[in-house]
Amino acid sequence: MESYVRKSRMQLKAELVQAYNLAGMIGHQVAAIFGDKHVKPPELWELHPDLFAEEKGLCEERQRQAELDLHKAKMIDHALRHNGKRGKGGGEAWKEQR
């Protein structure tokens, strides 16, 4: 009987934690809708880090690669503009090689 009560209590706690997390997520989404752009809803792995460690790593790697690609594109654009100002014309030839 004690085991049943203990299991029921653990299940109730799990359901309450889930409901609390859901309410928080809804609150974050509503805040974002009504103009607070600084509110960022937590990622799933922030709520359950032990279950989603692999997904967190994959997402961080994709985000890092996207940032590197953006930085590379900005540097190429800067080099092309700089070379164009110098009047060398080398920027156009380099652009065609890409």
Image (cartoon, rainbow, N blue to C red):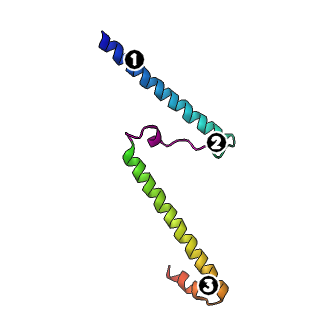
Q: Is residue 83 magenta?
A: no
Which residue is the site of mark 3?
83
> Which is more N-terminal, label 3 or label 1?
1
> Which is more N-terminal, label 1 or label 2?
1
Q: Residue at x 35, y 16 (%)?
A: 6
Which residue is the site of mark 2?
32
Describe the element under mark 3 as helix, strand or loop. Answer: helix
Which residue is the site of mark 1?
9
Q: Residue furthest right?
A: 35
In the depicted structure, whether residue 98 falls above or below residue 71: below
From mark 2 to mark 1, how far is it between C-alphas?
35 Å
From the viewer's perspective, tell me whether residue 16 is left or right of residue 24: left
- Along the line of sight, the residue nearer the viewer: 94 or 53: 53
Label 1 close to label 3 by CB (< 8 Å): no
How far from the left and from the top, in percent, is residue 12? Answer: 42, 20
Which circle, 2 or 1, is nearer the viewer?
Answer: 1
